[in-house]
Image (cartoon, rainbow, N blue to C red):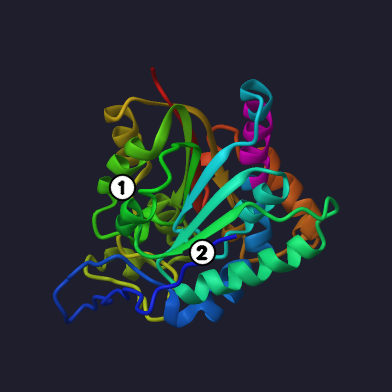
Amino acid sequence: MNHESSQSVNQAITPSINQPDTRTDRSFDAIADHFEKKVYGGLKGDIRLAVLRRDIFAYCTQMREIIGRPLRILDVGAGLAQIAIELAIQGHELIINDISSNMLEKAQANAAQCGESNQDNAKLAINWYVCPYQELEEKLASNTEKFDLIMCHALLEWLAEPVAVMDFFNQHLTENGALSLCFYNPASFDYRNLIMGNFNLLDNTEYKADNKKSLTPNHPVAKEEVESWLEAHHYQTILASGLRVFHDYSPLKRGGHNDPEAVIRMELRYSQLEPYKWLGRYLHILATRQA
């Protein structure tokens, strides 16, 4: 297992209402503990992982049978990399990347613990790269093989130029490879604030979240824009799911809301149904390249 670290990690300069909106790629290096607790410390994270596991694991199992070998998978902006680590446990070959050394240190600790409890007692096939995704090109130069699957989860909304990552995907994905995109849904922000009666916030065209601690992105990418990128780069969507299609919209917890397992079961049921899936706080699109 190769472990690469970076002495310096690019950290974003967070814009505020009173400062010029200078966008840079966001790193969560300074708030890694807060990120772990906020995103994955409760039911929200359980729902997120449940939907992604269902979507991605089923696809990987199917493709492994078709191509007759484990998949080569790249996780760009992986954060805590839970899905990637579980795929490595299943026997796939993983390269895991993030701009934050603190985030990947947490992921490596989790991978080490999972590896120790792996029933096959096999070494997990994971290489780690701490760097902005733009610097992966140089680090992957010795790896001439392309990837069967590239995962990019909750990264688009934190990139200064999100559309540019499509060229990176094209360069490193196999001809019949798949792209797993999970991204914040800006429509959910409007809908939740409508439900909560936060009309003043919605009327404030200059509102920006304080991203020193807030995990609400100020520059989310709409579903229609992502779909236009996929079409322009000749991808075909084979699956679309919503993550947290109702949980976040229920300030009053009653009935089944008090049963976490029931909530996850219903989230999974409605995550791929029209029109509910488009209400998800995050959207997951699995797309394949068209020959």
| 57 sits left or right of 17 in the view | right
Query: What residue type is disc 1 on?
Result: Val
Q: Residue at 34% across / 78% down in the picture?
A: 8
Q: Is residue 246 left or right of residue 65?
A: left
The reply to whether residue 42 is in sight is no
Mark number displayed over residue 79 = 2
Foreground residue, 179 or 171? 171
Which residue does the image show at 31% across and 58% down from the upper left?
135
**Residue 76 location (% of width, % of height):** 44, 53
- SS type, badge 2: loop
Tell me residue 287's x, y (percent).
Answer: 46, 31
User: Which residue, as the protein is rendered here, is positioned at the far left?
Assistant: 20
In the rendered image, residue 79 lying in the magenta stretch gets the answer no
Q: Amino acid at mark 2?
A: Gly
Q: Please provide percent x and percent y for residue 189.
A: 42, 58
Q: Quadrant of the N terminus?
A: bottom right
Q: Residue at x 30, y 36 (%)?
A: 229
Q: Which residue is labeled 1 in the image?
A: 165
Q: Quadrant of residue 231?
A: top left
Calculate the distance from the C-alpha at mark 1 to the C-alpha at mark 2.
17 Å
In this orientation, does residue 47 appear? yes
The residues colored magenta run: 53-63
Percent of width and height locating residue 89: 72, 50
Tag 1, which secondary structure?
A: helix
Q: Magenta stretch: dominant SS?
A: helix
Q: Residue furthest top?
A: 291
Q: Quadrant of the C terminus?
A: top left
